[in-house]
């Protein structure tokens, strides 16, 4: 995935109020927006090299967006909005052929027990198209084959037993646990469901839930897998001009961190 405008080199100073980052570009202080609400555990160090995107558009409160930070020798992508497009790119490139075949891919479709959750990607094929309720309604199908795909972005990699393990989450996530339960519900309804973890860095050898951070989520993932929810993990490589999926990495849900 190529960025419309190459990212600009910066020096990271601090993140605060969850969404704000102080940085320096060519020695001048700037404030950037962070889309990542996680803790970014192990990534944020005063003085670290960073990459920012500059987008001056009417209505934007901040012209800069925090896209990446250098940890050791690798660039780590911190922009969570990249995760779903990266999964779409992986589907197009055949990296996630396990989720095929499908005719349609739709973002942010309401689903779940209460119909209030939104799935990141709904892949579907076949079925009969239903009449639109109104001009703004999304096309809906009856009797189609569906794969509900939830996407999670992660920046956390830690060493365990000689392996570099990509992990999720980096903080307790009741929302993430709810999504696992929603996916289990769709499997019980006769559909397929999958978790895709996007590790936005190239140095993960394997993926595992971060049980030392959120044991409930780790248990929830194990339960989801036992119920038939599928899971995949991707590692990525980022540079100033773009970010790409490198390859899939194995998932070891039993690995205890």
Image (cartoon, rainbow, N blue to C red):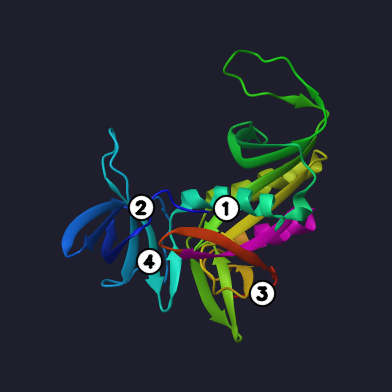
Q: Earlier in the sequence, mark 4 or mark 1?
A: 4
| Disc sitting over residue 255 in the figure | 3
Residue 218 rendering spot, x and y as whole percentages: 63, 63
Residue 62 rendering spot, x and y as whole percentages: 26, 44
Distance between the alpha carbons at the discs numbered 4 and 3: 27 Å
Q: Bin the neighbour count of mark 2 within 10 Å (Cα to Cα): few under 14, some 14-19, many 20 and up.
A: many
Q: Earlier in the sequence, mark 1 or mark 2?
A: 2
Distance between the alpha carbons at the discs numbered 1 and 2: 18 Å
Q: Nearer the viewer, mark 1 or mark 2?
A: 1
Asked if residue 114 is positioned above or below residue 136 in the image, the reply reads below
Residue to which mark 1 is pinned? 86
Q: Earlier in the sequence, mark 3 or mark 1?
A: 1
Residue to which mark 2 is pinned? 34
Residue 84 left/right relative to 15 = right
Task: Check disc 2 and report its element: helix, strand or loop.
Answer: loop
| Circles 3 and 1: CB atoms closer than 8 Å | no
- Span shown in magenta: 219-238
| Circles 4 and 1: CB atoms closer than 8 Å | no
Q: Nearer the viewer, mark 4 or mark 2?
A: 4
Residue 139 rendering spot, x and y as whole percentages: 68, 23
Q: Bin the neighbour count of mark 3 within 10 Å (Cα to Cα): few under 14, some 14-19, many 20 and up.
A: some
């Amino acid at each position: 995935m190529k960025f419309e405008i190459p990212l600009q080199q910066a020096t990271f100073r601090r993140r605060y109020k969850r969404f704000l980052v102080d940085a320096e570009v060519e020695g001048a202080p700037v404030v950037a927006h962070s889309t990542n609400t996680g803790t970014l555990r192990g990534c944020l160090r005063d003085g670290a090299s960073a990459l920012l995107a500059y987008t001056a558009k009417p209505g934007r409160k901040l012209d800069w967006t925090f896209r990446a930070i250098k940890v050791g020798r690798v660039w780590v992508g911190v922009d969570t909005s990249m995760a779903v497009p990266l999964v779409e790119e992986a589907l197009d490139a055949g990296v996630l052929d396990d989720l095929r075949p499908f005719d349609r891919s739709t973002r942010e479709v309401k689903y779940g027990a209460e119909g209030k959750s939104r799935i990141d990607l709904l892949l579907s094929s076949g079925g009969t198209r239903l009449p639109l309720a109104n001009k703004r309604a999304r096309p809906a199908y009856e009797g189609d084959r569906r794969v509900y795909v939830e996407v999670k972005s992660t920046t956390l990699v830690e060493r365990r037993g000689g392996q570099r393990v990509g992990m999720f989450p980096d903080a307790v996530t009741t929302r993430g646990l709810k999504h696992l339960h929603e996916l289990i519900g769709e499997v019980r309804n006769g559909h397929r469901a999958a978790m895709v973890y996007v590790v936005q860095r190239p140095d993960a050898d394997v993926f595992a839930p971060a049980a030392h951070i959120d044991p409930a989520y780790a248990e929830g993932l194990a339960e989801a897998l036992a119920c038939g929810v599928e899971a995949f993990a991707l590692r990525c490589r980022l540079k100033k001009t773009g970010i790409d999926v490198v390859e899939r990495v194995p998932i070891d849900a039993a690995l205890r961190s």
